Image: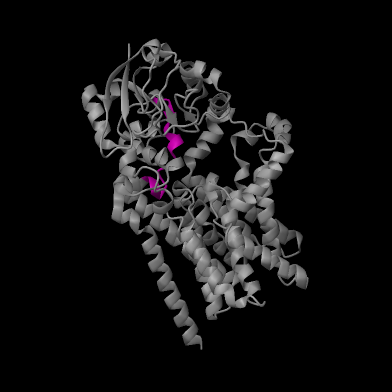
Amino acid sequence: MLFQENKAEKWLLIFAFIALAIFVSPLYILGENAHIRVHDNLDSNLAWYKVLAESGMLTGSVHAVIPQIINGQLSRNAFGTEFSLIVWLYALFPTMLAYAISQTITRVFAFIGMYLLLKTHLLKENNWIHLLINIGTSLAFSFTPVWPSGMLSTLGMPLALWAFLNIRKRESMWKSYLALTLLPFYSSIVLGFFFLLSAMGIFWLTDVLRGKGWNWRFLLSIVYMTVMFFIVEYRLVYSFLFDDEPNSRDEYFHARLSFWRSIRLTYKNYIYGHHHAATIHTLVILPVMVLAFLLVLRKKAWKAERMFTFLFILNLALSAWYAFWFYRGWLPLTERFHFLDTFNFARYHFLRPLVVYMLFALSLKILLRSWLKKVVPLLVAAQVLVCALTNEEIIYQTKPTVKQFFAEEQFREIKDYIGIPQEEYRVASIGIHPAIAQYNGFYTLDTYNNFYPLTYKYQFRKIIEKELAKNKTIRIYFDEWGGRCYIFTAELGKRYMFKKNTKKRLKNLELNIEPFKEMGGRYIFSAVPIDNAAENSLSLERTFESDSSAWKIYLYTTI
C-alpha cells in the first residue's frame, strides 16, 4: 500500500510539472509575439529593467541617477536593488526570454513551497486523495495571475511559512534556513514579505502569551530573514532613512472612502480579490470554503478544526483591513504620522493568496468526511482548470503583443527621422505610455515611477495645469498620487493606450509649451491627432505606422 501511495504521489508530481511546463510554454514559443499583462508590467517594469541595464548604473551608488528619465532627476534607487535576480535576468537576456525565465522560476517555486507546506504541516496523510488535494491545490496556486515583477513576493510565502514552521518545531533546520536565505534575492519586502514577517512576529508573540515558551530559534529565524532583506534591499533602506528630499510619495493620500464605501470594498475584495495578489477563488474555492464552514458550524467542530476556523476568520479580516485602510477615519492619524500615507499598510491583503489556498486544502479535507467526498477530485480539477485559464496568453488576447506594444521598428524609424543623438533632446507622449519611448532609448520628461522628486512633479505640472483644471478625475489622480507623471488631457482622461485604429482626436488641447521647452522638451509622440496643434505651439512633422506596431504615432515638434 505504501509503495502504491508513493507511486501515486510520483505520478501526480510528474503531471504537475508537465502542466507547469505547458503553462509557461507560450512565453518561450511565441517570444515577442506573446500577450502579457500591460498594467504595471509592459507599461513600467519591463522598460525599467532595459533602461537600467543600458544606463551603466546597474551597480551605481546610492546617489546615482538614471540620465534617460526626467532629466536625470530619477534616483537609481527607484529601480530596486542589483542583488535581485530579476534585474540580472533582464541585463543578461533579451526581454522576453528574461520574462519567461522569471515566470518559470516563480511558478515552480510557488508550487514547491505550497506542496511542502501542505504535506509537512496541514495534510500529513499519505493516501491518494490527500495527495491529490495537496498537489492539485499547489498547482492551482502556482497558476494564479499575480503581478509578474513581484516575483516570489506573494507566491514565495508558502515556502517561507514552511521554513518558519519547521524552525518553530526544530525540524529540517538547514533546508529551512536555506529557503529563508535565498527568498530575499527573488522577492520584495515592501510588496509582500514585510507583511508575512510581521505576521510571523505576531505568531511568535502569541506562542509566548499562550505559555509555549520564548522559542528563541523561531524568533531569530524571523530576525534573520528580516536582516537578509535589509541587506538585499539596502537601497530602499538608505532612501527611507537618509533621503530627506520630498518625493512624489509624500503627496499620496489614501484615506478618502466613506464607511459604507469601505464596507462595499470589503465585500468586493472578499469575493473577487485584488489584481496584484490574485487568488482566482470566486467560482470554486469560495463556495467550497463556505460549505466547509457550514459543516463545521453544524457539527460544532470549532476546536477540532481550529486551523480552518482561524484561517476562515483571517481571510475575512484581511479583506476588511484592505478596504478600511482607505477609510477617511484614518485622516487624523495620517496627518500626524506621515509614514501612514507613504507606506501602503493595506498590502496585508497580499497574505490572502497564501491564506485562501491553505483554506481550500483544509476545506476539501473537511468535505472528505461528509457526503460530498466523491466530488472532491472534481473540485480540485475545477480549480486547476479555472486558474489555468488565467494564463496571460488567454486573458490578454485583446491587448497588443509585446512586439506590437514596444514597436521597436516604428520607433527606430522615428529616431532615424529626427536624426539627432537621443540624449540631445527630450520627448513626451500623449495617448501612449512613456515606457514605450523609454524602451526605445528616448530621453523622456514623462514617466511612470512612484518615487521621484516632488520639485519635478511641480515643474512638470505647469505643462498640464490647464488640462488638470478642466477634469477633476485627472487632477486628483495627478495631484494626490502622481506616480504617472504623464501629459494628461481632459479629453482623453485616464486613458493612455490609443491604438492605431482609434477615431479619437484632441480638439481643445491646452498645454503650456514654454515650461515643456524650458525642460528640454522638443518632440511629442501622440497616438491621436491634435486638431489645434498650432494653438499649442506645436507643428506636425510626420505620422509613422508599422505593421508590427499597435500605434499610429503623430510626431509633433515645438515651434
Location of residue 335 with respect to 119 vertically, above or below = above
Q: Please state which of residues 59 and 80 is positioned toward the viewer in this rendering.
A: 80
Residue at image position (63%, 65%) is 288
Colour convention = one colour
Q: Residue at x 59, y 31 (%)?
A: 252
> Residue 377, how many percent across, how many down?
54, 74
Look at the picture and state if 252 lies above or below 91: above
Q: Measured from the top left, where is residue 466 in percent x and y? A: 51, 15
Corner quadrant of residue 67: top left
- What is the quadrant of the C terminus in the image? top left
Magenta segment includes 444:
no
Q: On screen, 44 above or below 225?
A: above
Q: Is residue 67 above or below residue 321?
A: above
In the rendered view, does 362 fall on the left or right side of 6? right
User: Residue lying furthest front in this view?
Assistant: 503
Residue 381 position, x and y percent, is 50, 69
Q: Visible in this render: residue 130? A: yes
Give how far across and how far down residue 96 sits, in percent: 32, 48
Is residue 73 found inside the magenta-colored segment of the image? yes
Determine the residue positioned at 63% across, 68% down. Answer: 363
Q: Which residues are magenta?
A: 72-87
Left or right: residue 462 versus residue 213 is left
Residue 172 shows up from this direction = no
Q: Quadrant of residue 58?
A: top left
What count of labels does the image hold?
Answer: 0
Name the image quarter holding residue 72.
Answer: top left
